Image: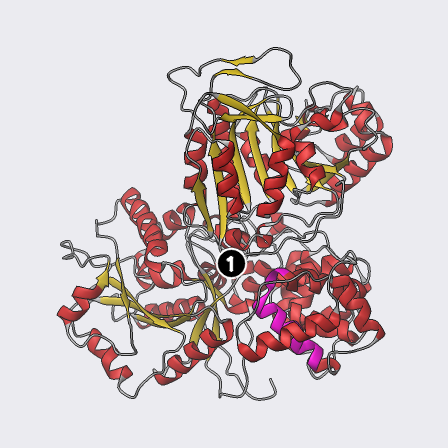
Amino acid sequence: MLTDVLLPAPVRRHLAHRREQMEGRYARVRLLTPDDGSRDLAALRWEVVPLPSAEASVGEWHAWAAEPSAPPADGGCPLGVHPSFTLVRDVASTAPVPTSTPVTVGRVTIADATAIHGEVAVPVFAEPLTLPEPPPEALTDADGRLVRQAVRGSRLSARVVDAPATPGALWQALSEGTQVFYFGGHHVASGLVVGADTGAGPVWLDVDTLAGWLLQADVRLAVLMACDSAVSENGEEPDQSAARRLVRAGVPHVVAVMGKVSHDQAKRFSGSFFSALTRGEEIDRALLAGRARLGDAAAVPVLFTRYGARELAVELLPELRETQRAPVAHRLPVGDGVVVPEPDERHRVHLDTRWCLTERPVLDVLADPTADDLPRLLLDAERLLVRARNAAGHVREALRRWYVYDASSDRLPRTESQLRARVSPAFGQPAPGADRGVGLVLRFDGTVVPHDGLRQELDQLYRFGWDLRVVVLQIRDEDPARVRDSAEELARALGLDEYLLRTSVSSAVSSGTAPRPRRLLPANTGTDASGRGAGELLAWAREADASGRPGPLFDVAPRTVVEELNTEASWGGPQGELGVLAVVRRYWPALYRPLLEAYASARSRPARGLSLQLAAHRDEDLDRWLRAAGEQLPLPGEVGALVRGRALVGTVVLGLLRAGHADTDAFDDWLAEAPPEVAEAVATAKRGPEALIGEDLARPDVAVALDRAGMLDGVDLGRLDPSGTWHGTWALLARRPLTEGTAHWLYGLREAPRRVLGLAPATGPGPERSDRELEVQLAAYRHALVPPLPRTQVGD
């Protein structure tokens, strides 16, 4: 009955058609609930509706679309746990809600009242309601602990309200501002049961009161792990649902529960949900990950969103955006002081691979606006290598030891004792046989000016007897431009040909599940009459660019900006317009992305081509641009011939291929100008991922193009190239984070390639060391692992 009512024939045919086109991606199914008060459709359990499983054939999907009353031929899979779909309940807000303002430091407020018991007065009940005492073995605050653990290390700090939470404590915590609110406890008649401020027992907190506090705090996600918080008390009053009331009041996203949820279930869900969220999953995918931990439980966590709200992807929460175990960077050439190169996705690297897998000593300069604790991140990779080495039965060796030295000035330590006394963590004597050596991070701020003797001071560190394998000069500064300038100047003074730029990437890049972002988010280009337009944005950008001190992001309507620019080009011509976009990208990435989408969907030429040129600097931004463009795919003529270089053309070709536009005229026009390695990758991609063979990775440039085209998503390099023969495999190794599977594969290789990676002790003089053919082979592996960058010249 649910299938017939909720999925009528046109919807079923649409789902079957989309399933045929998805090719490993997923579809978001949205239910817009009516607001006429007739019935609570949001409370219907769509999650139990059976669909054909993800492995079902195209024919089985079409048979289901034609005859929904019959169960799917393969037994089916409930919509609530189907890997190909997620379900979102849209609710219309009672009043326009202004766009929330991102903040530099984010917070999740965790409130627990699960241990509350006794009698509580509820206005809709004539008699007090009695809540039973939880069993002694119940871990009433286990869910809150897992939430804290999940956000640890991310940009979202945890604020825990003393348990049991009281109205006064909640108001105090929320009044200080927060982005995410988590509540674990009881829900009764659209209210939460919390402790009394006087300590005299439980009290009932109206959810409408809570909604006011959440809006004042700028909460963008509320999670209510409380029984029946997603359903109405009775069918005649659908607005009684606590989740729906919060969303109608203006909270953009609410996760609540249908049915009764136990302490253990709340723990399992919350840990998985927040872990997925901080890894970079969209909220509906994070919900799917948490729900999968509940098995056959009667409790069903569901998602409500405010209709028309911006998609809650991780990049819209700056505090969650960059949760990464292994930092990602781009290699940039040290220029001649005139040309400032942009990050090139062809030269992206994972720093755990670069710094934990090396035979030769490495000296790197890293421009790192995020200022992460690099030793902590790299120690995880070292432990992974140790586990793989021990499993392979190789000779035991200690972890590579990582230390940090904070250079308060531009002077480095002059003596070994001075270095030893100021490193963190505290210096420890190496264990016997610790031939993995030492990694040292020298931290500088963005005002560092290299002096004439810096290179000599750096060389002196290698004479201290620490067996330095990696030395990293980490430049930290909140200003993205200043940190890049300082890093390049420092690299030039040290005689280096390149430096590294830590860039903002989605977690798809850092997780290892995909080499680049795969999910194309819907465009957010709606007109908001309350947002500011092109003139205000220009003034704001000029002030930020001149002062280097960007103000907080204000309310901007991207579509309004673009429509005003179409009417009157007020940003100083094409180059002036490109400059404003670049400033917005630098200082306000949360605005830059929807502004790109508005340009792609509505800006007139040639400015639209300029935005494409800017979006092509990052594959993730280009995906957004193409998604927003819809059927208005770009043509080569939109970008001037003088700036339509090989790198830009190749990037657009791969972007169109990722987006599924390989059968369009636009794709053919771009492909006609594509460089040879991209054309070869396209020809290989047309065979399909199942037809890939190891020889397809023979050339590093073709392998990187296949990687960027999405053809190698989830591909096991050890399966495709078991012996590590192909040079393209080594180029891909540098682009990917270390995983258990990769580490086991590396320790299964013969000694020669492991020696290139620093995973085998150097052998003494002998036939192998003097084998010229072997040395040529090792040199080719090293070249593929770290190929030289093209030199930067004026006019490139």
Image quarter for residue 68?
top right
In depth, the one of 38 and 747 nearer the eye is 38
Residue 421: image location, x then y, percent: 16, 65
In the depicted structure, whether residue 306 falls above or below residue 207: below
Residue 778: image location, x then y, percent: 36, 68
In the depicted structure, whether residue 146 falls above or below residue 765: above
Residue 423: image location, x then y, percent: 22, 63
Identity of the residue drawn at 80% across and 24% down: 39
Q: Which SS class for mark 1?
A: loop
In the depicted structure, whether residue 100 falls above or below residue 307: below
Quarter of the image with the C terminus in it: bottom right
Q: List the single residue furthest toward the front.
A: 198
**Do we see residue 348 in this rendering?**
yes
Q: Is residue 588 magenta?
A: yes
Image quarter for residue 208?
top right
In depth, the one of 413 and 95 nearer the eye is 95
509 left or right, relative to 427: right
In depth, the one of 642 and 359 nearer the eye is 642
Disc 1 residue type (three-letter): Thr
Image quarter for residue 13?
top right
In depth, the one of 168 and 264 nearer the eye is 168
Q: Which residue is mark 1?
A: 104
Quarter of the image with the N terminus in it: top right
Residue 441: image location, x then y, percent: 31, 66
541 left or right, relative to 341: right
**Do we see residue 437 in this rendering?**
no
393 left or right, relative to 194: left
What's the coloring here? secondary structure
Specify the principal SS of the magenta part. helix
Which residues fall within the magenta stretch? Answer: 576-590
